[in-house]
Image (spheres, helix red, strand yellow):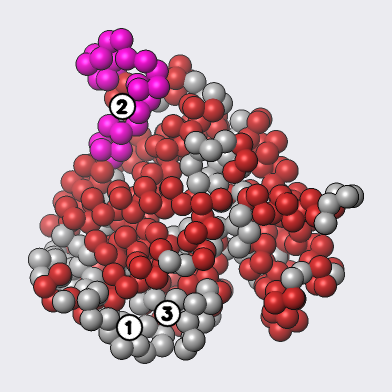
């Protein structure tokens, strides 16, 4: 089946039939390629289901309409597949990477990640990309023959977007590209920028819906203003809610089209003949210089006006405190942990505590903290 599915791919695309394989050998599936099988394993994993209750910017209990890591991952996959189709690379691989890229995120988004990294400083730190890899390699418990999901090298390569050199040296072939400054596959590069397109535009939507940023404020950003002007000229009496939806969907389309165009230009110039040519060259998937400047300006706006808004900062400070105090409590007294996690701490030390805390959803972390520190809860 893999030959018929992948026959129309570009020469530089990843092919499941030529995959560098899995850590544990398995009999190939009869009706799916290995990359399709990776995607299916990710969707059925416990860590993927937990993303429903892990948030991007707003904590889960603050509202049902704000985006979660699950909805974000689905949006990234949709954007990435559209790009991959236009570039004639492997849609199944890019979808698998997109769906798995946030599996290692802590509760409470980047605030929780920063707090857990701080708590783990004496034990090697905490990197959410590395934790995503740890989830699919070790922590999922679904198969009798091995720990983790036993994904292909190419999917695991795409999940690991960033990695310190110290940790890269421990990862063998998977970490070598960080040491040698090589590129991942085109599919991995697409998933990385699809992630950026999704979270920037959808954080605008959530920020405006919450009232923490206003149309007047973001109207000063050229990328947003240009599309808003077009929408208002077409629909003079459009309500603000629809104006926001029309603007953000058009921005997403503009970013995707620009990314495809610039990447095609780079592919023509580099003329890679294989996936190894991709890995040994410069980055191929990118925005044009003009669009990169505009996208960076949008990111700076969100950082200043949304992520650092005093209401968000208040919640993120609470989140940091919850994560720090949970980690400290379990480190100082492992008997507070459920029995299976306690046994892992005895065998693996604080890293197992980080696994337990990182795997929590927002609401579970809040509830667990209340059980430990509030009188009357247990």
Image height check: is 139 above or below 257? below
Image check: 299 left or right of 377? left
Rendering coords of residue 212 (x, y %)? 56, 26
* Mark 3 vs mark 1, CA separation in Å: 9 Å
The residue located at (21%, 48%) in the rendering is 260
Please tell me whether mark 3 sits on a helix, a strand or a loop: loop
Q: Are marks 2 and 3 in contact (CB under 8 Å)?
A: no
Please tell me whether mark 2 sits on a helix, a strand or a loop: helix
Splitting the image into 4 quarters, where does residue 11 fall?
Answer: bottom left
Image check: 65 left or right of 25? right
Q: Earlier in the sequence, mark 2 or mark 1?
A: 1
Q: For residue 150, which numbered disc appears in the image? A: 3
Rendering coords of residue 258 (x, y %)? 23, 42
The mark closer to the camera, 2 or 1, is: 2
Q: Are marks 2 and 1 in contact (CB under 8 Å)?
A: no
Magenta span of residues: 229-255
Image height check: is 40 above or below 50? below
* Mark 2 vs mark 1, CA separation in Å: 43 Å
Please tell me whether mark 1 sits on a helix, a strand or a loop: loop
Q: Earlier in the sequence, mark 2 or mark 3?
A: 3
Q: Earlier in the sequence, mark 3 or mark 1?
A: 1
Please name the residue that numbered disc 2 is placed on: 246
Quadrant of the snapshot with the C terminus: bottom right
Image check: 261 left or right of 246? left
Residue 90 in the magenta stretch? The answer is: no
Please name the residue that numbered disc 1 is placed on: 21
* Mark 2 vs mark 3, CA separation in Å: 41 Å
Image height check: is 219 above or below 293? above
């Amino acid at each position: 089946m893999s030959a018929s599915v992948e026959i129309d791919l570009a020469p530089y695309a990843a092919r499941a039939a030529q995959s560098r394989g899995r850590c544990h050998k398995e009999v190939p599936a009869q009706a799916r390629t290995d990359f399709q099988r990776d995607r299916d394993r990710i969707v059925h994993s416990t860590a993927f289901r937990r993303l429903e209750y892990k948030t991007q910017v707003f904590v889960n209990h603050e509202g049902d309409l704000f985006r979660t890591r699950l909805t974000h991952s689905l949006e990234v996959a949709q954007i990435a597949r559209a790009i991959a189709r236009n570039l004639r690379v492997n849609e199944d691989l890019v979808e698998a990477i997109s769906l798995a890229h946030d599996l290692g995120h802590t509760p409470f988004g980047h605030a929780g990640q920063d707090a857990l990294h701080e708590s783990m400083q004496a034990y090697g730190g905490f990197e959410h990309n590395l934790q995503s890899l740890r989830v699919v390699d070790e922590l999922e418990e679904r198969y009798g023959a091995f720990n983790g999901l036993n994904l292909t090298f190419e999917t695991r390569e795409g999940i690991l977007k960033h990695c310190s050199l110290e940790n890269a040296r421990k990862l063998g072939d998977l970490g070598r590209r960080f040491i040698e400054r090589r590129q991942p596959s085109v599919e991995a590069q697409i998933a990385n920028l699809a992630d950026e397109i999704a979270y920037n535009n959808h954080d605008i939507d959530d920020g405006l819906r919450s009232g923490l940023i206003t149309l007047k404020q973001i109207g000063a950003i050229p990328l947003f203003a240009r599309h808003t002007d077009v929408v208002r000229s077409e629909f003079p009496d459009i309500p603000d809610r629809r104006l926001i939806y029309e603007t953000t969907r058009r921005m997403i389309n503009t970013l995707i089209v620009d990314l495809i165009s610039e990447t095609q230009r780079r592919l023509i110039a580099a003329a890679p003949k294989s996936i190894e040519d991709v890995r040994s060259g410069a980055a191929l998937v990118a925005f044009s210089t003009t669009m990169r400047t505009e996208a960076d300006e949008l990111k700076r706006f969100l950082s200043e006006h949304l992520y650092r808004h005093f209401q968000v900062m208040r919640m993120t400070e609470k989140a940091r405190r919850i994560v720090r105090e949970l980690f400290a409590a379990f480190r100082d007294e492992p008997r507070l942990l459920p029995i299976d996690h306690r046994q892992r701490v005895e065998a693996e030390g604080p890293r197992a505590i980080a696994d337990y805390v990182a795997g929590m959803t927002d609401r579970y972390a809040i509830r667990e903290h209340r059980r430990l520190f509030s009188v009357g809860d247990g």
